């Protein structure tokens, strides 16, 4: 069979690795696969890939979204060109992943999906598909997505709008476009996300929970020079990793945790911006994002404890990656990450830096001072 995957990026970041690994698995079974992506690719030279649009298309779409708050409704010409290629490729299955990211026009894509007669899978990695703006909403306690978004309290979060609030219009357009697609099945990585989907306008689709997987050939105990490189030979390393350190990822909790741990410990955070790194206290080592899975595996392995104080995750790939590298993990209760530690080992604690500290001390077998 011929498969077409569509995602914002290819081969890196959690969703890019998931899409690429799915291609590899199907290709190993003898299927033909192409991974179409909107922005960048890395670590996937072994997979056929197709870009959707150009860097200029992406910039114009992002600029439009900043002004008009209509992410997903730019890139019309680029999407039409891509769909011409899709018709020539003629896949049997179209497998959608993240559609946000300023690279595809939802109206053009779903008009095609509605009439193409293809089997469609859509793996949801967040909640963007059924809101009028945001990808997550629990952090601010918003439930307008259940009945109809308006007056968005997160207008200035990704996908950020500096002027308009078009959450009501986006919600109505998404609802009209995304519902009633023949032969479409939704795939979600946790029961946490499944419960939200079943309360949304996507509730009529069949939904399957499939936990994300990682490449065990990459994410495994991987000795390296991480400790030596950063002078951490005599420290207990408390590691955190994120592609983007937003408020919901728990950066403030790490800052508070750093004040509760003594000189025996060193918090290391990967994925920070230069501005965030410059603002860190001395007892936290901040590092930029890396697209090297080898470097990530080495950092996970070097750490004594992996901590994810995120309050909103639909799965938590970094937690699973850390566990596969043999590192203990601490997450918050009531999140999708709790499902990971219940399945693969680790500790789920009540929210708050004090609880994180207690778990870190217990897992490293250190006494409180």
Image (cartoon, grey):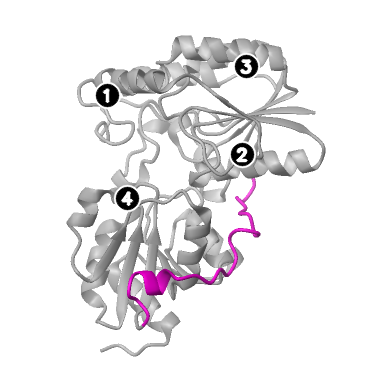
**Which image quarter: residue 285?**
bottom left
Q: CA distance from mark 3 to mark 2?
A: 28 Å
Q: Quadrant of the N terminus?
A: top right
Say which label, 3 or 4, has the lower sequence index.
3
- The residue pinned by badge 1 equals 66
Mark with earlier residue (1, 4): 1
What is the C-alpha distance between the residues marked 1 and 3?
27 Å
Q: Which mark is residue 287?
A: none
Residue beneath disc 4: 245
Inspect the magenta stretch and tell me whether residue 215 lies in it. yes
Closest to the camera, between mark 3 and mark 2, is 2
Q: Mark 3 or mark 2: which comes first in sequence?
A: 2
Q: Nearer the viewer, mark 2 or mark 4?
A: 2
Q: Badge 2 is on which residue? A: 45
Q: Main secondary structure of the magenta part?
A: loop
Check disc 4 and report its element: helix, strand or loop. Answer: loop
User: Is residue 156 shown left or right of residue 215?
Assistant: left
Query: Which stretch appears magenta?
Result: 209-233
Q: Is residue 54 left or right of residue 161?
A: right
User: Eyeballing the image, is 338 above or below 191?
Assistant: below
What residue is drawn where x is 36% and y is 34%?
134
Q: Residues within 10 Å of mark 2 (few under 14, many from 20)?
A: few
Residue that appears at 59% across and 13% down: 83
* Mark toward the start of the polypeptide (2 vs 1): 2
Cα–Cα span, label 2 and label 4: 28 Å
x and y, in percent, of residue 37 in the image: 53, 29
The numbered dot on residue 113 is 3
Q: Is residue 91 above or below residue 331?
A: above
């Amino acid at each position: 069979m011929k498969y077409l995957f569509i995602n914002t990026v290819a081969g890196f970041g959690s969703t890019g690795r998931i899409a690429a690994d799915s291609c590899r698995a199907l290709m190993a079974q003898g299927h033909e696969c192409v991974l179409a992506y909107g922005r960048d690719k890395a670590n996937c030279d072994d997979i056929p890939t197709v870009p959707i649009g150009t860097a200029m298309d992406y910039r114009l779409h992002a600029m439009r979204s900043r002004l008009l708050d209509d992410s997903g409704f730019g890139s019309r010409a680029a999407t039409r060109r891509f769909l011409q290629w899709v018709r020539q490729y003629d896949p049997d299955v179209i497998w959608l992943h993240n559609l946000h990211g300023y690279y595809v026009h939802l109206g053009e894509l779903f008009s095609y999906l509605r009439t193409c007669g293809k089997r469609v899978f859509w793996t949801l990695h967040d909640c963007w598909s059924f809101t009028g703006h945001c990808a997550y909403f629990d952090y601010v306690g918003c439930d307008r997505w259940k009945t109809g978004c308006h007056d968005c309290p997160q207008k200035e979060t990704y996908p950020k709008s500096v002027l308009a609030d078009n959450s009501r219009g986006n919600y109505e357009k998404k609802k009209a476009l995304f519902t009633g697609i023949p032969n479409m099945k939704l795939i979600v990585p946790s029961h946490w996300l499944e419960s939200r989907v079943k309360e949304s306008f996507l509730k009529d689709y069949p939904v399957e929970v499939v936990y994300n997987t990682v490449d065990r050939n990459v994410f495994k105990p991987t000795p390296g020079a991480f400790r030596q490189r950063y002078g951490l030979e005599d420290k207990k390393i408390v590691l955190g990793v994120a592609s983007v350190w937003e408020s919901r990822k728990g950066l403030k909790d790490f800052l508070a945790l750093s004040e509760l741990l003594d000189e025996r410990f060193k918090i290391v955070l990967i994925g920070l911006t230069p501005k965030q790194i410059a603002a860190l206290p001395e007892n936290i080592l901040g590092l930029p994002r890396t697209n090297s899975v080898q470097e990530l595996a080495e950092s996970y392995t070097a750490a004594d404890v992996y901590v994810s104080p995120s309050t909103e995750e639909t799965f938590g790939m970094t937690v699973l990656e850390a566990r596969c590298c043999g590192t203990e993990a601490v997450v918050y209760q009531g999140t999708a990450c709790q499902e990971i530690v219940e399945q693969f080992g680790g500790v789920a604690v009540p929210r708050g830096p004090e609880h994180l500290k207690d778990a870190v001390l217990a897992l490293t077998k250190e006494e409180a001072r």
